[in-house]
Image (cartoon, rainbow, N blue to C red):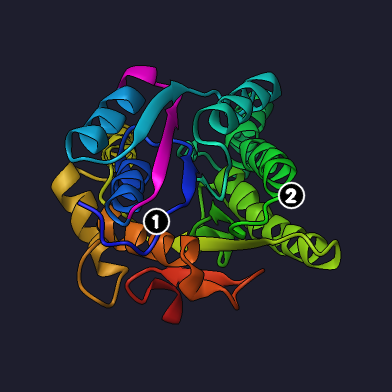
């Protein structure tokens, strides 16, 4: 199963039950990492972990609400107890935007999006640094999933854009802190375009229901047209970047942005 690029590393993945998180967990394991798969849907996390172990890898699947700091503390301690160290943390868990205009967006919806998409990343970075800063055998890598909407703006997603933009700069602040503290930890962000995931499918269905598109096929075609490369991304496209940032091949990268968007932001 293993290709060896991540042998000896232990990776912790949030939102690992589906989409980018699941593809990343499987790819990390395929390259030799031990993987902790976490998700709000515990059964989905366990199922992905089972795929990894069935293929000969090492993995566990656990529940994690990324907005709950006590759960973060418990899962990180369990990771250290199970695998001895933490060397890779993928902050991937997130929820879709509300698709409301700023003037119509409820404060409760704004707060919910930021709680998951920003606070959840902050807690991961905080507790990831605490767990990794004493590492001597292997340097740590924290990877934060932002979005193209952490770089450019769009309409009807003010909550999502605000959170993803904040993740981009939180990443840089954390990278500088770790470097100045001489911690053996790199922190980088990934900025995907539109990726074929269950969250995207649910979002397209919601937009059709709200009258933005006549049907999901049309919605899909419109999104494809935004990407010069001619297609939407696949979870494996992003997972390949995760493996690179998790590996020692990216040892000279910190505070950087890796954009995987089919040319979306080149226009």
Residue nearest the observer in this picture, 214 or 65: 65
Q: In the drawing, what numbered circle is on residue 261? A: none
Count of numbered tags: 2
Find residue 44 and report its horizontal and vertical position in percent: 31, 24
Quarter placement of the C terminus: bottom left
Please name the residue that numbered disc 1 is placed on: 7
Q: Residue at x 34, y 53 (%)?
A: 32
Q: Residue at x 19, y 43 (%)?
A: 214
Q: Does any portion of residue 267 appear in the rendered image?
A: no
Residue 19, by quadrant, is: top left
**In the rendered image, the vertical position of residue 83 relative to residue 156, given as above or below:** above
Q: Residue at x 74, y 42 (%)?
A: 130
Find residue 113 and report its horizontal and vertical position in percent: 58, 34
The part of the chain drawn in magenta is: 32-43
Please tell me whether mark 1 sits on a helix, a strand or a loop: loop
Kindly give the residue lying farthest to the right in the view shown. 181
Please name the residue that numbered disc 2 is placed on: 134
Residue nearest the observer in this picture, 264 or 196: 196
Q: Earlier in the sequence, mark 2 or mark 1?
A: 1
Q: Residue at x 74, y 51 (%)?
A: 133
Does the stretch in magenta take in 36?
A: yes
Kindly give the residue lying farthest to the left in the view shown. 217
Does the stretch in magenta take in 85?
A: no
Please tell me whether mark 2 sits on a helix, a strand or a loop: loop
Tell whether label 1 touches label 2 (CB within 8 Å): no
Left of 236 or right of it: where is 64? right
Kindly give the residue lying farthest to the bottom in the view shown. 266
């Amino acid at each position: 199963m293993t290709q060896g690029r991540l042998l000896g590393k232990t990776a912790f993945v949030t939102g690992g039950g589906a989409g980018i998180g699941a593809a990343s967990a499987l790819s990390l394991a395929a390259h030799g990492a031990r993987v902790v798969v976490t998700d709000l849907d515990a059964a989905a996390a366990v199922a992905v972990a089972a795929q990894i172990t069935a293929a000969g890898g090492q993995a566990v699947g656990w529940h994690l609400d990324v907005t709950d700091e006590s759960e973060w503390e418990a899962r990180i301690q369990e990771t250290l107890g199970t695998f001895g160290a933490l060397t890779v943390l993928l902050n991937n868990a997130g929820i879709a935007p509300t698709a409301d205009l700023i003037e119509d967006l409820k404060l409760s919806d704004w707060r919910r999006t930021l709680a998951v998409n920003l606070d959840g990343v902050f807690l991961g970075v905080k507790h990831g640094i605490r767990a990794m800063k004493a590492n001597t055998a292997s340097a740590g890598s924290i990877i934060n999933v932002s979005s193209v909407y952490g770089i450019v703006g769009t309409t009807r997603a003010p909550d999502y854009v605000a959170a993803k933009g904040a993740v981009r700069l939180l990443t840089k602040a954390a990278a500088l802190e770790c470097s100045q503290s001489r911690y053996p930890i790199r922190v980088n962000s990934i900025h995907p375009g539109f990726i074929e995931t269950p969250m995207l499918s649910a979002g397209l269905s919601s937009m059709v229901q709200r009258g933005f598109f006549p049907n999901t096929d049309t919605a899909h075609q419109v999104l494809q047209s935004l990407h010069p490369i001619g297609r939407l991304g696949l979870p494996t496209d992003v997972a390949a970047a995760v493996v690179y940032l998790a590996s020692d091949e990216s040892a000279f990268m910190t505070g950087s942005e890796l954009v995987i968007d089919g040319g979306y932001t080149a226009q």
